[in-house]
Amino acid sequence: NLPDKKIITIEDPVEYQINGVNQIHVNPQIGLTFAAGLRSIVRQDPDVIMVGEMRDLETAEIGIRAALTGHLVFSTLHTNDAPSAIARLVDMGAEDYLLASSILGIMAQRLVRVICPNCREEEEVDKEILRGAGFTNGLDHPIYHGVGCKDCAMTGFLGRLGIFETMIMNEEIRRLTISNSDSTQLRKAAINGGMITLRQDGFHKVREGITTLAEVLRVTQDM
């Protein structure tokens, strides 16, 4: 956030006030929807645009056009993982060739509970269970869990932390997008291109003693 960058957001609601950023609160009662607000924002020639959520085709199309005309656009979608965002936009009615040209990258996130540091103990887990879960890197590394204490209300967890995967658009992913490939093919191409998946990032945090294996499997069970 630099003084020479014009940053405008449209959010529902504005949850945090950010210095140096022009923030707009969606108000459908007066006609200020995401699409209407975004259309107004583009006319103000911003450098960076953040749209709270791509809820409909109209908003998506305006955002895509803004990206194609040199604006850096950020937004969110509700999908299972990063590759599924492209399929979601196509399902909305967005043109696949425009998506291939306008998207730079997609990040997915899930929240996992953090092991309580005040009652964390090493946990014995059968290596066959670890292998079956796909936890093959670091089998000899200690695994931890929280046994429960007054600080965590006997839950064994205290706070939450994000696990992430980032799909960077490359030529193969663009080609698959234009050919209307499904999210499974996109995901395979992203992994071949070096994407660390949500589960892999979760396993990394298990090895660091931040969260539990069961917690990572719980939040990634649909993948």
Image (cartoon, grey):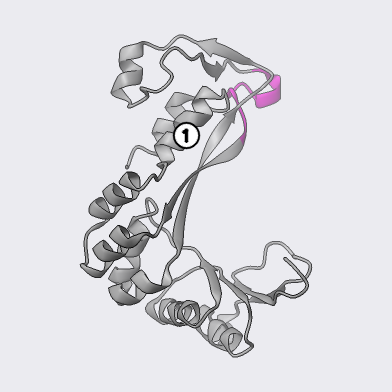
Which residue is identified by label 1?
202
Q: Which residues are magenta?
A: 149-159
Compared across the picture, whether 152 is left or right of 175 comes to: right
Compared across the picture, whether 17 is left or right of 193 comes to: right
Residue 118 higher or lower than 42, as above or below = above
Image position, residue 165 (x, y; %):
45, 46
Q: Quadrant of the C terminus?
A: top left
Compared across the picture, whether 220 is left or right of 72 comes to: left
Q: Quadrant of the N terminus?
A: bottom right
> Splitting the image into 4 quarters, where does residue 176 fall?
bottom left
> Splitting the image into 4 quarters, where does residue 10 fall?
bottom right
**Mark 1 crowd level (few <14, some 14–19, many ≥20, 10 Å Cα):** many
Residue drawn at 40 percent across, 75 percent down: 56
Compared across the picture, whether 194 is left or right of 149 comes to: left
Q: Does residue 48 appear in this view?
A: yes
Q: Is residue 156 magenta?
A: yes
At label 1, the amino acid type is: Gly
Q: Does residue 94 appear in this view?
A: no
Image position, residue 199 (x, y; %):
41, 36
Residue drawn at 45 percent across, 60 percent down: 105
Residue drawn at 58 percent across, 15 percent down: 147
Q: Is residue 136 magenta?
A: no
Mark 1 element type: helix
Residue 174 higher or lower than 33, as above or below = above
In the image shown, does 91 or 49 lie closer to the viewer? Answer: 49
In the image shown, does 172 or 64 lie closer to the viewer? Answer: 172
Residue drawn at 54 percent across, 11 percent down: 122
Image position, residue 101 (x, y; %):
37, 73
Image position, residue 222 (x, y; %):
32, 42
